[in-house]
Structures are given as C-alpha cells and as structure tokens.
Image (cartoon, coloured by chain):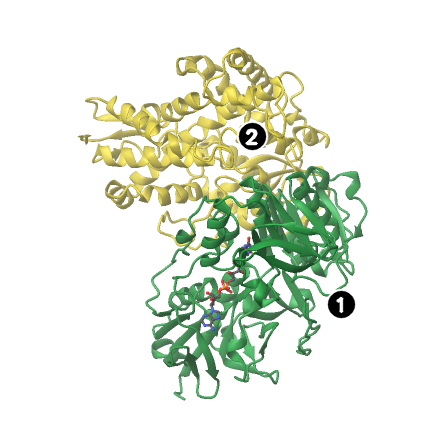
Chain colours: A yellow, B green
Amino acid sequence: MPQASLLRQITDFANRANPYPLYEELRRTPVLHEADGPYVISSYYDIEALLHDPRISSDAAKMTATGDDELSEPETTGLPPSFIRLDPPEHDRLRRIANSSFGPPHRPTRIDSMRGELAQIVTDLIDGFGDARQIDVVDGCAYPFPVTVICRLLGVPREDEPRFRAWVDPIVAGLDPDTRTSAESERVAQEARLQLGMYLNGLVEQRVKEPRDDMLSDLVNSRGPDGAMTTMEVLTTAVLLLIAGHETTVNLITNGMLTLLRHPEYLQRLRQDPILSVKIVEELLRYEPPVQLLPQRTCITDIEVRGVTIPKGSRIWLVLAAGNRDPERFKDPDRFDPDREDLQHLGFGSGIHSCFGAPLARLEAQIALSELARRLENPRLVEDPPPYRPNAVLRGPRHLNVDFDGLNP
Amino acid sequence: MPADYMGWLRREGRIVIVGASLAGLRAAETLRAEGFAGELTLIGDEPYEPYDRPPLSKAVLLGMASPHHTELPHRREIDAKWRLGVAATGLDLAAKRVRLADGDEVEYDRLLIATGVRARPWFKEEEARLDGVCLLRTRDDAVDLYRRLKAGPRRVFVIGAGFAGSEVASACREMGLPVTVAERAGAPLVGALGGVIGAVASDLQLENGVDLRTHVTVTGLEGDAVGRVRAVHLSDESVVEADVVVVSLGSLRNTEWLAGSGLGAGPRGIACDAGCRAFDFRGIVTDDVFVAGDVARSPHALFGYQFLSLEHWGNAVAQAQTAAHNMICHGADRRPHLWMPAFWSSMFGVNIKSVGVPPMGEQLMITQGSPAERRFVGVYGYQGRMVAAVSFDNTRWLEFYQRQIERGAPFPVEFPTTDRRPEGRQPVDADFPDPSLPSHGPMVTLSGYSPADQQLVFHPARH
Ligand SMILES: Cc1cc2nc3c(=O)[nH]c(=O)nc-3n(C[C@H](O)[C@H](O)[C@H](O)COP(=O)(O)OP(=O)(O)OC[C@H]3O[C@@H](n4cnc5c(N)ncnc54)[C@H](O)[C@@H]3O)c2cc1C
C-alpha cells in the first residue's frame, strides 16, 4: 500500500535531512490511516483543533485500553507518567505545581531574570573555541548551553552530565516511533527512566533537608493551593524537565544555525540587529520545529475529522512540522521568512500541553543565535546537509561543522 | 460621481472616523493596510491617544500597570489627522458632514462611527457628585479610583456585580481593602452567565472576603458636611459606611450626538447590517456610514439573525477590520461581520472566558472539570443546539467549543471528555433572570429575531 510506505519513509533515517517533501505528500491525505497504524493528521487547522479537543487523551494508560497498540505499554514499572502523559485534572494539578516555581503568576520573572546568566554561559562557550577555525556547533554550544541552563535551574550538578546522559539517550530513543517497534527498546527506556529517577531522588532528598534556590527544592517543598507533589511525582516531573529542558533546545539552536547559514542575508541582519532574533526564532519554530510530531494521543470517543470518522480508541499522530508548512494556513510556507506578518506556528504545540518550557527555550535560542551570528567571522557550512540524529520526533543535526575566520570580541 | 468611484475613493477620498479608541484605531490601520491612500481623520473627545481599557479594572487598580501607559500599540503607520479632545456633536447625512464641539465641520465621503459606550452614572445627580463616588470607563476614571484605593479607604462599596464591578471588588481584596458589593440579582455575573455560574462567582467572592449583598438595590448615597460620600443605603434598610463608592451599573451608548441626524441610532446603539453599514431610522441601509465596536448592533446569522450588541474587546477589533474593509470595497468583495462573541475577565485569581452568547442559553451542562473546584467548562444549550460555553481557569479548551457552536453542535452534550464528571451528565436550567424584568446591563443584549425585524425595543429604565 503506498500510504503505508509514506509513513515508513518519514520514520526512515534516510529521509531525516529533508522530510518536508514527504510532509507535503502527507498533507494530500489530511487524515491518513494505514493498516493497524495511527491516524496521521498533517494539516495546520486540524492539528490545531485536535490540540484543543477534550475528546483527545494524552493519558498513557488510556492508550493501551485500546489493545491495538502493545508498544505503548503504560509505564507500569518504576516511575508514574509525567504530566505530558496525563489528562486533566491530574495533568493540570501537576503542571500548575511545576509552573508555580517556573513562570507566571507566581514566578513571572524567573526566566527573564536569567538573561544575564544565559548570555554569560554562551560567551564562555564561544570563548572556549579559542584559536579553532572550525567548530561543531552542536558539541561546542547548542548542546552544552541548554544542559548547563537546565542543570542550574533544576539544581542538578553540571558535572553529573556524563552520568545522566547514559540514561537520557535510551529514554529519548524510546520516543522515536521507529525504535518503538521494538518492545526491547521500550523496556530499556523504562529502565533508564527509573535509573534517572533514582539518581534525581538522591538530590531530592538533599533538598528536603536543605532547600536551595532551585526548582528541585521548589518541587519538593510546594505548598500551594494544589497541595504538594508526592515524591514519585516530583521525580517524574524532574525527569521530564531535565530531558525536555535540553533535548529540544539543542535542536532549535542547531536547526537555527543551519537555517541561517543557508540564508546568509538573515545571518547578516541578525549580526547587526540582535532584536531580530525574536522573529527568527519564531519563524524557526515554524520552519524547522525541534519536535516534528506528537505521537502520543488517543481519542476516547468516535470523532470526525474532515469527513473521516476516527474510531474510539485510535491512536493519533499530530505532525506539527507538516502543519507548519501547510499552504492552507501560510503563504509561501516553504520559505524561511522571519519578516512574515503573521508569525504563527505549532512548534510548541497548543492547548493544555503546549510546551511548558517555551519561554526558556525561546530565550536560549535567541541568545545563542544572536551571539553565534555576532561572534563567528564569516561562518561557512562544512557539509550540507549535516549528519542528523536518528530520532524522527526530536529531529536535528547530530553535528554541525562550521568553518570561520576568527572570533569577534 | 466618478465612473470608477471606488478607485477614486481609495486614492483620494476622505474618510472620517468618530471615536478614537480601540475600534477607531484598528479601523484606521486596516484602511491603510488595504491600500486606502486618501485623507483620514480621527475624531476623539478624550484628549489621549487610543488606549486599552481592560487593564483599567485589573492591572491598573493593582498598581501593576500605570494608567498612563496603556496606550494601544500601533500596528502600522496610519498617517491620519488627529482631532483629539474634541467631541463630534452632530451629523448631516445629506451634506456628509460631521459637526464638532469647537464649531468646525469635517466633510467625508465615508464615515465610521465608533463612539463606544460610557459608564452609566449614578441616577441621582446630586449624590453622583459626592466626592468619592466613582465610575470606571476612562483612563481618568482609573487614575482617580487608583489614587483613592491607594489612600486606604476604610471600606469600598461597589454597586453592581457585573464583570467590571466584580473585577473592582477583586482588586480591592487583593489590596487588602474591605469591600461590599451590592447586586440586585441573586448572584454576581447573573446577567451575563446565568444563576448557576453566578453561584460559583458568589462563592468565589465570599471566599475572598467580599461582603456580598444580593437581592438588594442601593436606594441612596449619603454624604457628610463637606460633600464626601460616607454611607450607602440599601433596599433592605441596611446602611453601609464607605468612603469610596464605585458605580458599576453597565453602560450607555454614545449616540446622543446623532439625535436628529436621521440615523437609526438610539439608546440601544446604532443598528447596522452584517456588513457594518448603519441603518437610517427608517430601517434603510446607508452606504457611506459604517459602525463598529461597542456602539454597534448587528445581526448574527448563527444566532437566529438576532441583533447583538457586544461590549467585547475582540468584537471591537474584528468589527473595525470588517467595517474598514467594506468601506473601501465594492459590494461583491464585502465581508459580513460574523465574529464569534468571546469575552474574558479575570477576578480573584480566576480566568473567566466565554464564547458564543450565554444569555441565549436555556440549559447548562458542565462538560469538563467541576464548579466545586472552580475549574470547569460549562456549555449552554438552546433548542437542541450548543450556543455558548464558559470556562473558569480552562481557557485553552474554548476553541473547541467555539468550533462546536459554529457547527451547530447538538445539545445536550453526549460525548465524553477527558475530564467529564458524573455531575455534568444531565443538563440543568441555566437560570437567567426573566428578560422582561429590569437588570443591570448584561454584557450582551439581544433584540429582534430575523433580518426583516428591525424594530427598536426600548427596555424600561433600570431604576
Ligand atoms: C474597565 C473596563 C474593563 C474591560 N474589560 C474587558 C475585558 O476584560 N474583556 C473584554 O472583552 N472587554 C473588556 N472591556 C470592554 C472593551 O474595553 C470594549 O469592548 C472596547 O473598549 C470597545 O472599543 P470601542 O472602540 O468600540 O469603544 P470605546 O473604547 O468606548 O471608545 C469609544 C471612544 O469614542 C469616544 N467618543 C464617544 N462619543 C464621542 C463623540 N461624540 N465624539 C468623539 N469621540 C467620542 C469615547 O470617549 C471613546 O474614547 C472593558 C471595558 C472597561 C471600561
């Protein structure tokens, strides 16, 4: 069946560097369903509607109730599901508690007040390039920067990065629809999640005794109107924030640098006008979103999308990156154009599960890109396309080698 | 008239906008964005550049935003002649002229009226003049009220528990000020959202320490020897001492300046067709006078062609854009103003939002969450159809309900949702007050039933 192959092509690593022609094909069947597979939604308006549809569940437990998807076993062993895999009211409660130490209304300035600190981290990383005339943007900046930031924010020792890296990698691999076809990788991911949780538990225990000014302390000591999180809830939330706090931003920054190198006029403008980074990052979230698709939704009743009835219990994929280039929604969607009047996107999702870390991710990408643009003299891509990470969901280059003539002060 | 009138109008016509606030500014921007190159004049009786009102009863009262800094951001250059601080006092439809308070006259080829509404003042003039009796509509009002609240009055008294009054009460509590709220109906927000939701709003006020008095009216305000308000008398014979009284009794449409002009303008606003063209008093549509914003009353196909007059921020923006577009277009290119009514408010830490026309609903179902937790979505039904939804701290779902309303989704709501509770399985009476009884202006007023029915319905005075 040609449709079956389309989905397989999208998850196929061979097409990672440029999946957009496949997405275009996907949009021709706005509700694509191949045998036993998920219902795949690819148009902007449909995705946007389903993200606000209370008949769509993100609950890990409800997905298996359908029986047709043995691969997404609920996380029975180890840690309970984090709030991205829960529905209201539980989702709302946990997300609110987490948010009370992160954003408005309780901490409206927490992220913004990190501006100076963030800029300093980037400066140090770029200074660290030393006399090199070629760097890997990923290893040199796009990865270490958000890791350092999320470690500081949560209160995780930065030096422990090699330790938690060993658990993060299999967890992230478990999110890849391709590796999900193996029950073994699922088991490995669960095991890694548990290990990471146990590691964080050590830190949490310290924070109970000696709270500091970090999110782990806030989470264990939350006493708002929603009450406190249980220890297990604190751990799954911390695992979520630690991983989501850098695995996506690294791609946003790397995709950003790659896109700017492919569109040197914007690199040039950004160098002169760092404020442009605000628009550039928004357009990047449309044009090259770090999260390409959301594979974890189910409908709890029959629903109709564009005349197709999706039966109760079906798994639904929302292909954000395809919606972001939907010509029904955007003029000239395949053009990277930070000047477009109506800068909108599904890059952070929408609705109650819209990206928790969006304010931080935006700021990190704005600072990293404007600093890289300003300081790298005459940067050039070494290879195009660069080598990609395997993941089809969290898509981005594994390396981004760039030649340059020197560093501006 | 030139053969290519529209081409001429777009190039060198004269467009006048009366009312230089939200709707006026957005209309001006749209005109320029769509290529109007002629002469554009904005007339506003307030001495200020267009500013935003919703913060006035929220952030401004809490001192979180300065009333002097709520200017509306300009979305583009509009290159207009601004006539600020001067009211329009009359309109000559035949000669296409607007008369101004300073004696000037301004000629137009197309006119947009966006004069909005003003706060309904306390009905006893002498009492209304007492020092400490406040209204809240303009920036000046907000400056004055903020100053008084900041001074730490012993008690604030709010007359009327609609959205604005409730927001003021919320600000007072947040500032730690004792506040009494008097409401003629059985609960706050009843006119806008009905008694069931009103009861939730009641609990919210009581929990937050508001001295809420329902089923009462204020009968008089009492001043001291030097003309400062000192006490409020209620219909249940009680007397409450207060040194600030906020009169929050809904609004009056700014249409008096059109008296005698021949336009279909009156206390219920200016009736217009779905394309924002004003009707004259005979019910005939004009083609050079347009209206937008709080002052307009236009038919909505989705709600039985009822003439809706909406005091909603989003409506003012959308209607201004549609009116502006239609002003410089030929008939076939015109668009109807079919904006889905939507309103938001925030009080006592809760975000409230509604879509559709709740007062049209007869029945209500809670489809997500629970009123007891103050987080829920309620759906209003009318004759088997979903006509509105309201959310408390659940804003992000409303888009879904909006689409359901647009599609004429059936009511009662049968489908399950991820957070549907047993209590929401059966519809209940939404409990709106009998519309034939006077009430303090609900946010939405409805009249007329079909496109052919353009009769003005005058409601009795509210006191
Ligand atoms: C305190 C407050 C809080 C609000 N909160 C919300 C909210 O949370 N959500 C929401 O959806 N809406 C809210 N609103 C309503 C929203 O502000 C209005 O819907 C919006 O301002 C309407 O815009 P408009 O341009 O139609 O009218 P207005 O803003 O009323 O502007 C009309 C302008 O015309 C001027 N004018 C009147 N007569 C003349 C004349 N003869 N000549 C010249 N100028 C004249 C007026 O002085 C005024 O400046 C609130 C309003 C207030 C007052």
Q: Mark 2 lies on which chain?
A: A
Residue A390 in sight in this render: no
Quick one: SS at disc 2?
A: loop
Same subunit, tags 2 and 1: no
- Which residue is at the front of the view, A93 or B9? A93
Identify the residue at horizontal 70%, vertical 55% (top origin): B190
Is A68 left or right of B41, judged from the image as shown? right
Which chain is disc 1 placed on?
Answer: B
Task: Report helix, strand or loop for mark 1.
Answer: loop
The answer to whether residue A349 is seen in the rendering is yes
Residue A95 is situated, as x and y percent measured from the top left of the image, at 58, 31
* Horizontal and vertical percent position of residue B41: 37, 73
Query: What residue is shown with label 1?
Result: B436
Q: Provide the residue designation for mark 2.
A: A177
- B216 or B86: nearer the eye? B216
- Percent coordinates x, y for residue A118 in the rendering: 35, 28
Side of B408 where A403 appears, left or right:
left
